[in-house]
Image (cartoon, rainbow, N blue to C red):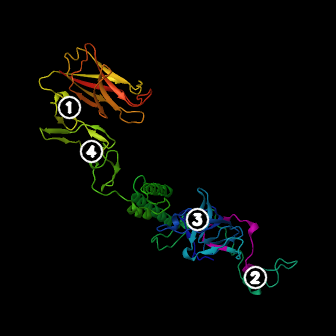
């Protein structure tokens, strides 16, 4: 059997023992065994139950002994054990009139635990568990005994007395020496009746742990003072919301709630933790939390992106992100005449999907001398000393149909062109393509049939031939060669022509 080296009172058990000295009934209810282990810093007086109870055994024996002791017995069998366990814990339970069933005393065998195998194996376990307990001067001691489970031990069978018919006792069970001893006892020598009640002060004690105290009440007062002192120190160590007047259960709840919170916080940081671990273990795991590192600041990280640096505090970047593309105006720009344009972009992240825009409303071809190209895109058409006029007209919508070899035209009025032009430059605004996406042949004509210019695959046409456009209104015809284009419902947008007339 596991070696327990005696059982130790719990705080509630010691309190019940003190009550029993005043006549309160001391009633043992059951014996429990388990396989739990005491954690570091865990003490027996603070226990209210077994750490890991495996079986509850009914009391089958209660024998009073001398010197304030009693034997509480139970039987252990493995015939109802389905999973084997180590018999490491032993506890005696009793009934407190105010608190109900309590753990009276407790023992833990530690490494000396005995393994109890499950049923069905080669080992059949049937053993008696007799446990000595302290009852001191208590007189009203009982137990809840299940007589159906009572069986005799080998020692009890060996010393049994066989009953002889006609006699209360068998021969040789009452010796001559015992008879002579009784004969020498004076009459009424043991005629003593213990009073039903008496003050606890008449119970004297001698305990080195309580020097100067000679009565049980004095020892109990010392124990209460010690318990209160321990509670106050624990409450101070815990801090709010724990208080010095909290009960042991309340202090335990504060500690367990704090452990649960700490475990959740560790789990949130991807560190494995459980509220059942000790405080020391949980605090030790704080070192496993991975903090951010680096010297990045919010203005160094793209906007809406989160990060942490050496501070370990989650932060959100503010650096502008223009990578989605679009048109952006620069922070500033300057032009070095005849050489370069210097553009200062706004701070941010860019991609090739966007462009910078600089407003230049007067940067037009008619404002630039003919033969000069500005910024690789604006070719001058200005003829010094000659009048010019510019007309923009829509020539196609997405719903119009132009058959193969068809034509479109752009009209203008005499008010818009108050002179006879000798040069017309047309610029088609938009993409012209056939049903296969090929650029078609575009031609500039007059009166639908006079072909003055034909350039394949270009959108800008020039001619120096004087075109007799007639009077009001005049027209510029644009012939479209190739397959039909701009079918109904086509997703392409409208197309327009920009016409610049020179006198």
475 w.r.t. 357: above or below: above
* Viewer-proximal residue among 100 and 264: 264
**Residue hosting label 4:** 348
What secondary structure is found at the residue carrying circle 4?
Answer: loop
Q: Are marks 1 and 2 in contact (CB under 8 Å)?
A: no
Q: CA distance from mark 3 to mark 1?
A: 85 Å
Counting residues from the N terminus, which is met first, the one under dot 4 or under dot 1? 4
**Residue hosting label 1:** 360
Q: Is residue 159 visible?
A: no
What secondary structure is found at the residue carrying circle 1?
Answer: loop
Q: CA distance from mark 4 to mark 3?
A: 63 Å
Q: Which mark is residue 197?
A: none
**Residue hosting label 2:** 158
11 w.r.t. 403: above or below: below
Residue numbers of the magenta segment: 129-157
- Is-magenta flag for residue 142? yes
Counting residues from the N terminus, which is met first, the one under dot 4 or under dot 2? 2
Which one is closest to the eye, mark 3 or mark 2?
A: 3
């Amino acid at each position: 059997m596991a070696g327990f080296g005696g059982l130790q009172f719990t705080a509630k058990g010691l309190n019940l023992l003190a009550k029993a000295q005043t006549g309160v009934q001391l009633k043992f209810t059951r014996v429990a065994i388990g396989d739990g282990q005491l954690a570091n810093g865990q003490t027996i007086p603070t226990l209210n139950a077994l750490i890991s109870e495996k079986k509850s055994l009914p009391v089958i024996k209660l024998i009073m002994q001398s010197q304030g002791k009693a034997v509480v017995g139970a039987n252990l069998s493995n015939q109802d054990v389905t999973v084997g366990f180590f018999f490491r814990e032993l506890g005696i339970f009793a009934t407190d009139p105010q608190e109900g069933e309590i753990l009276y005393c407790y023992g833990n065998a530690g490494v000396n635990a005995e393994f109890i195998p499950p049923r069905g194996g080669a080992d059949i376990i049937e053993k008696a568990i007799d446990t000595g307990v302290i009852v001191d001067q208590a007189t009203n001691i009982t137990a809840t005994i299940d007589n159906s489970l009572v069986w005799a031990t080998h020692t009890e069978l060996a010393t049994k007395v066989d009953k002889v018919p006609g006699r209360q006792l068998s021969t040789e069970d009452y010796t001559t020496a015992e008879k002579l001893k009784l004969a020498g006892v004076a009459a009424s020598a043991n005629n003593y009746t213990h009073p039903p009640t008496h003050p606890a002060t008449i119970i004297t004690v001698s305990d080195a742990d309580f020097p100067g105290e000679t009565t049980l009440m004095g020892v109990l007062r010392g124990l209460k003072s010690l318990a209160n002192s321990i509670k106050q120190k624990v409450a101070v160590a815990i801090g709010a919301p724990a208080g010095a007047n909290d009960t042991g259960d309340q202090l335990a709840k504060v500690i367990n709630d704090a452990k649960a919170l700490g475990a959740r916080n560790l789990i949130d940081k991807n560190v494995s933790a459980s509220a059942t671990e000790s405080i020391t273990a949980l605090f030790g795991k704080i070192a496993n939390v991975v903090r951010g590192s680096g010297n990045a600041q919010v203005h160094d990280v793209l906007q809406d992106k989160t990060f942490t640096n050496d501070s370990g505090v989650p932060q959100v970047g503010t650096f502008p992100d223009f990578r989605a593309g679009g048109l952006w105006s620069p922070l500033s720009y300057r032009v070095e005449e005849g050489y370069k344009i210097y553009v200062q972009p706004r701070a941010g992240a860019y991609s090739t999907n966007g462009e910078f825009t600089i407003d230049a409303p007067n940067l037009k071809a008619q404002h630039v001398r003919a033969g000069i190209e500005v910024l690789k895109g604006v070719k001058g058409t200005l003829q010094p000393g000659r009048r010019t006029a510019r007309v923009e007209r829509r020539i196609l919508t997405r719903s119009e149909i132009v058959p193969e070899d068809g034509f479109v035209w752009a009209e203008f009025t005499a008010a818009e062109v108050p002179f006879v032009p000798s040069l017309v430059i047309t610029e088609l605004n938009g993409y012209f393509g056939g049903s296969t996406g090929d650029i078609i042949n575009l031609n500039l004509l007059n009166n639908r049939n006079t072909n003055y210019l034909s350039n394949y695959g270009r959108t800008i046409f020039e001619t120096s031939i004087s075109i007799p456009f007639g009077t009001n209104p005049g027209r510029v015809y644009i012939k479209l060669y190739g397959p039909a284009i701009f079918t109904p419902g086509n997703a392409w947008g409208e197309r327009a022509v920009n016409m610049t007339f020179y006198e």
